[in-house]
């Protein structure tokens, strides 16, 4: 017996059946109901989500700065009109570079810089992190060379904060807090840390040494350096010395180029040349947002550093 096919009485000749339309209609209605329930559910929980985010924000502030007061202190010290303008300028330069709107910007990033070996900068970064827990710039370590006690100051803190750190390592009361770690170096660690460094004003017999790890193009570092916070402390207290160490970050494409020229200035012409070149390099980076061999060579000529010796150092 042959099996008869189901027929459809639909007058529109579309081949569909009324039951199919009914199922479709029910599916649409159910979907709308489900969507409405979801919408009401999400809105009812929105307040709880906002509360959770607010609690998370407070927890991060407490973990990083211990209190809103400390966070606001750092925020007010950093977020100046000059800093915001500098950031906006760098963003515009990066956008222009990505879209090829500025040949000059692209050439600065992909030109022919004299790149130093990564080993030197990796050593400074490794030293800062392993000894003091410093992973960003500017990072500072206040060290008592007699007791080897240190206090890390991880950021562009105001003068009073550094004075507190100095007093703490002097009297042996330094503790880990929102500014950074505290502890004691071994004799070997301290010897390696200060081997071959340039002491500002040649003050290499000071009881307290502040080691500053910095990036010449980093806006925070520029502001920290321009404020002369550490320089003022050193000038006021002969028992405090300053040592600057280059720690160029990977995403500042010409920072390592500037750092190499600064280091060579010291190797070729001594401590005064090192810090004089450093002053002018920071000024150039702030003005141009980058380094080129031409701009750095101009600084070397201005400081009258022997060109042949400089060239030998750069290409070593």
Image (tube, rainbow, N blue to C red):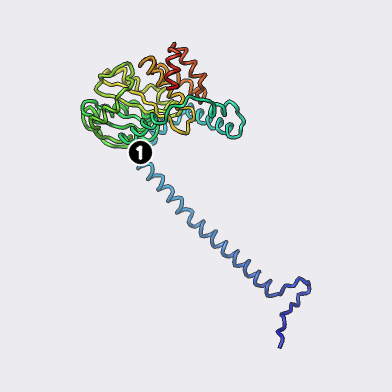
Residue at image position (59%, 31%) is 96
Residue beneath label 1, please? 65
Q: Seen in the image, is 91 located left or right of residue 53?
A: right
How many marks are shown on the rendered structure? 1
Horizontal and vertical percent position of residue 19:
68, 75
Residue 274 image-quadrant placement:
top left
Considering every residue shown, the one lying at the far bottom of the view is 1
The front one of 5 and 78 is 5
Residue at image position (46%, 52%) is 49
Residue 11 image-quadrant placement:
bottom right
Horizontal and vertical percent position of residue 5:
72, 80
If the image is split into quadrants, where does the C terminus sit? top left
Q: Seen in the image, is 152 located left or right of residue 9?
A: left
Label 1 crowd bin: few (<14), some (14–19), many (20+), radius 10 Å: some
The front one of 118 and 185 is 118
Q: Seen in the image, is 251 located left or right of residue 165?
A: right
If the image is split into quadrants, where does the N terminus sit? bottom right
Residue 75 image-quadrant placement:
top left
Helix, strand or loop at mark 1: helix
Considering every residue shown, the one lying at the far top of the view is 304
Residue at image position (26%, 28%) is 190
Horizontal and vertical percent position of residue 103:
60, 27
């Amino acid at each position: 017996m042959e099996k008869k096919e189901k027929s459809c009485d639909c007058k529109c000749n579309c081949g569909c059946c009324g039951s199919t339309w009914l199922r479709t209609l029910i599916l649409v209605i159910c979907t709308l109901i489900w969507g409405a329930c979801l919408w009401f559910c999400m809105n009812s929980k929105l307040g709880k989500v906002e509360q959770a985010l607010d609690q998370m924000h407070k927890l991060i502030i407490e973990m990083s700065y211990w209190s809103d007061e400390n966070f606001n202190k750092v925020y007010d010290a950093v977020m100046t009109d000059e800093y915001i303008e500098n950031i906006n300028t760098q963003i515009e330069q990066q956008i222009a570079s990505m879209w090829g709107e500025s040949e000059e910007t692209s050439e600065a990033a992909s030109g022919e810089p004299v790149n130093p070996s990564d080993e030197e900068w990796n050593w400074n970064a490794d030293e800062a992190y392993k000894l003091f827990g410093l992973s960003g710039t500017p990072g500072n370590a206040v060290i008592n060379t007699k007791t080897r006690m240190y206090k890390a100051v991880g950021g562009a803190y105001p003068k009073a904060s550094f004075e507190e750190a100095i007093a703490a390592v002097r009297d042996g009361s330094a503790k880990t807090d929102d500014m950074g770690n505290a502890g004691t170096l071994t004799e070997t660690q301290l010897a390696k840390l200060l081997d071959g460094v340039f002491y500002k004003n040649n003050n290499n017999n000071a009881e307290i040494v502040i080691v500053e790890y910095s990036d010449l193009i980093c806006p925070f570092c520029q502001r920290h350096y321009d404020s002369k916070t550490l320089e003022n402390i050193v000038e006021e207290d002969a028992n405090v010395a300053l040592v600057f160490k280059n720690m160029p970050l990977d995403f500042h494409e010409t920072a390592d180029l500037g750092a190499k020229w600064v280091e060579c200035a010291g190797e070729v012409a001594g401590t005064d040349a090192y810090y004089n070149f450093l002053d002018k390099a920071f000024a150039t980076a702030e003005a141009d947002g980058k380094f080129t061999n031409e701009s750095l060579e101009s600084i070397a000529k201005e400081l009258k550093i022997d060109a042949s010796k400089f060239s030998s150092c750069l290409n070593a």
